[in-house]
Amino acid sequence: MARPAKSVKVKSGAIAGDDAAIRQDVENKLRGENTPPDPPACLTDEQREIFQFIVDGLAESEILGRLDVFVLESTAVAIDRLHAINNMIDANPQLIINTALQNSRAKYQSDLWRGCNELCLSPQARAKIGNLAAQKQKEKKDPLMAALSEDD
């Protein structure tokens, strides 16, 4: 099975210069406004806190747009419901053998992993984002790169 495509901002593989610019432009247009998404009113207070925690954590990467609200919403709900299920099991360890509860837990765990994948929240994705940010910072400060870019 093919791997899901990643944003140009977090991709670490080689991309031709023209392709990278075109993809970046298209991604920016599709992402929507470059403003942090607001939590939907339908979320509980706990879900809103989770939503905001994720948005705040990804603010510097500049990969979120207003259209990401739906992925963020489902991820926040999954995390909140996983917490609730785990708290139920902690309060009553007999529930660990409850098939319906374990099926619900598996469903929300799957939703969480999907959200993490969509939002680049895995440790590997964060490492790539960090590496790319460091490279961009170095390019900004590198006098040789500045001199070379002036010649273009």
Image: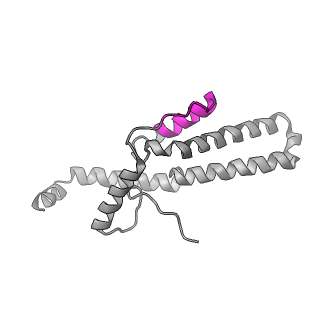
Is 67 displayed left or right of 44 in the figure?
left
Rendered view: 50 above or below 64? above
State the scheme by which the image is colored: one colour
Rendered view: 5 above or below 72? below
Percent of width and height locating residue 5: 48, 63
Which residue: 65% across, 50% down? 111
Which residue: 39% across, 38% down? 35
- Pick out the residue farthest to the bottom: 1
Rendered view: 40 above or below 141? above
Count of all numbered marks drawn on residues in the image: 0
Which residue: 80% across, 48% down? 102
Q: Which residues are magenta?
A: 38-56
Quadrant in the rendering for residue 92 = top right
- Pick out the residue farthest to the top: 45
Percent of width and height locating residue 51: 55, 37
State the predominant SS element of the stretch in magenta: helix
Is 50 displayed left or right of 98 in the figure?
left
Is 148 displayed left or right of 110 in the figure?
left
Quadrant in the rendering for residue 17 = bottom left
Percent of width and height locating residue 112: 63, 48
Image quadrant in which the N terminus is located: bottom right
Image quadrant in which the C terminus is located: bottom left
- Residue 60 or 47: which is nearer the viewer? 47
- Residue 46 or 129: which is nearer the viewer? 46
Quadrant in the rendering for residue 142 = bottom left
Task: Give yes or no for residue 133 being in the magenta stretch.
Answer: no
Percent of width and height locating residue 6: 46, 60
Which residue: 55% across, 54% down? 117
Task: Give yes or no for residue 50 being in the magenta stretch.
Answer: yes
